[in-house]
Amino acid sequence: MELHGGVTAWAVTGHDELQALLADPRVGKDIRHWSAWTEGRIPQDWPLLAMVTVPGMTTSDGEDHRRLRSLVGRGFTPRRVEALRPRVEAIVAELLERLERLADPGSGSGSGSDSGSGPGPVDLCEHFAYPLPMRVIAELLGVPEEGLDALHQYSTTVVSSSATPEESVAAYRGLTGLLGAVAAARREQPGDDLTSDLIAVRDAEDRLSERELVGTMILMLVAGHGTTLNLITNAVRRCRRTRSSARWCCPGRCPGPRWSRRPCATTPRWPTSRCATPWRTSPWAG
């Protein structure tokens, strides 16, 4: 296949072929494997360049990957995640209350019918599945409230399949600038957030560089947001299809872990639309 700018790429769609590719030591995530890059055939303004050059675990192999994973693991702990639980529950309650208001035609803010005959339809993705992980991750990273709109705009454009190359490049620069400013502020004044923890963490004399720190923040945002959004919408879609699907989601209408384990474990197995990203390179790939 041909990517923007005439860059050649291969889409691997078979399970056996993909398994063999990922196990091949000649293939890796580090852009130094890519002959088209090392030979200077990829222009500096290529729109997808940031995706394969951002410093972090998605672009590192072997010892480099283990080093980054060790450092990030010292800051991104179960204790840090558990500390977010009260805020996650508060955000969920706030968004669900807003969904109810939007669906109520008598509230004046609904999107349903004005006839007063009953609640109308509400876009679950727009009003719940999208803002929930965005707000949680923003709080995890310590992004101030005034930066949420920009974070939303930049991150949406970066992963959009309909954005122009110029829009993608501008959005990525804006995103790195915003998260870089958050990191700089936390270096001056640490807070109770993951960014401060990642800045403070050390392994002997080693620590994350500024670019590695921002790259890790981008990874947390992109990897955590899209996966949660898709899980919520796909699970709700399945639960709404039939009575048996509803029982599958919520056996006995029991709240808590019994509900969450089943959809979280099996929803990703359902066929959904996917986007492909060039995460592997080799000397023979270009």
Image (tube, rainbow, N blue to C red):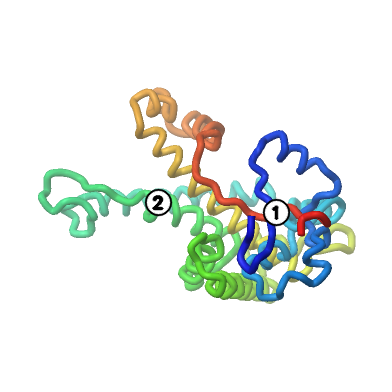
Who's the residue at 18% across and 59% down the image? 108
Q: What secondary structure is marked by label 2?
A: helix
Who's the residue at 51% across and 66% down the image? 157
- Count of all numbered marks drawn on residues in the image: 2
Q: Position of residue 196 (x, y in %)?
A: 68, 64
* Residue 271 visible in the snapshot: yes
Q: CA distance from mark 1 to mark 2?
A: 27 Å
Left or right of residue 157: residue 60: right
Question: Disc 2 marks which amino acid?
Answer: Cys
Q: Which residue is mark 1?
A: 279
Q: Position of residue 205 (x, y in %)?
A: 89, 63
Who's the residue at 32% across and 54% down the image? 98
* Farthest-out residue, right: 204
Q: Residues within 10 Å of mark 2 (few under 14, many from 20)?
A: some
Q: Quadrant of residue 54?
A: bottom right
- Whichever of callouts 1 and 2 sits on the residue coming sooner in the sequence is 2
Q: Residues within 10 Å of mark 1 (few under 14, many from 20)?
A: few
Q: Tell me, for residue 125, which label it has, or none.
A: 2
Q: Position of residue 106 (x, y in %)?
A: 15, 53
Question: Disc 1 marks which amino acid?
Answer: Trp
